[in-house]
Amino acid sequence: MPTFRWLPRFRAEFNRLTPTQQAAFLAAVAHFVEDLRSGQGFRSSLRVKGVKGSAGVFEMSWAPDGRATFRYGGAVKPGEAHIIWRRVGTHDIFREP
């Protein structure tokens, strides 16, 4: 099972989301984890891709205007991905991904 960590800014932004938005993000994360575990790449609906101009930072879509950014950290469990969640919200997060 992949491990993860929320940066303090991410936690604050997540707490500002509506309950509906939080549920949508967590549902997308369930798919994200399934895809990580399969090793077959991410499903197209998550639109995971690198953030231009921010080396090592990736974005994931969780709603039409819902985005989250993350980076990969050092493995906590051998052989498992470690995800560091950086930002969550609307497209506005790309001002400082």
Image (cartoon, rainbow, N blue to C red):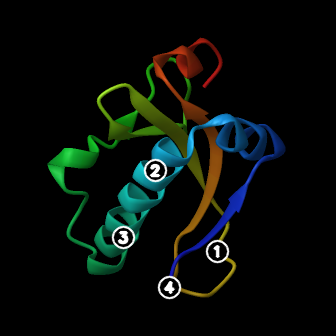
Cβ–Cβ under 8 Å for marks 1 and 4: no
Q: Residue furthest front?
A: 19
Give the CA separation, mark 4 to mark 3.
9 Å
Of residue 75 and residue 25, the one placed in the foreground of this image is 25
The numbered disc on residue 25 is 2
Report which residue position mark 4 lands on.
Answer: 1
Give the CA separation, mark 3 to mark 2.
16 Å
Q: Amino acid at mark 2?
A: Phe
Q: Earlier in the sequence, mark 4 or mark 2?
A: 4
Residue 43, percent from left and from top: 19, 56
Task: Kindly identify the residue that appears in the image at 64 percent across and 74 percent down.
Answer: 75
Q: Amino acid at mark 3?
A: Leu
> SS class of the residue under badge 1?
loop
> SS class of the residue under badge 3?
helix
**Is 3 on the left-hand or right-hand side of 37?**
right
Report which residue position mark 1 lands on.
Answer: 75
Give the CA separation, mark 1 to mark 2.
23 Å
Q: Earlier in the sequence, mark 3 or mark 2?
A: 2
Residue 41, percent from left and from top: 24, 62
Residue 25, percent from left and from top: 46, 50
Q: Nearer the viewer, mark 3 or mark 1?
A: 3
> SS class of the residue under badge 2?
helix
Report which residue position mark 3 lands on.
Answer: 36
Q: Earlier in the sequence, mark 1 or mark 4?
A: 4
Q: Amino acid at mark 1?
A: Ala
Q: Amino acid at mark 4?
A: Met
Task: Kindly identify the residue that appears in the image at 39 percent across and 68 percent down.
Answer: 30
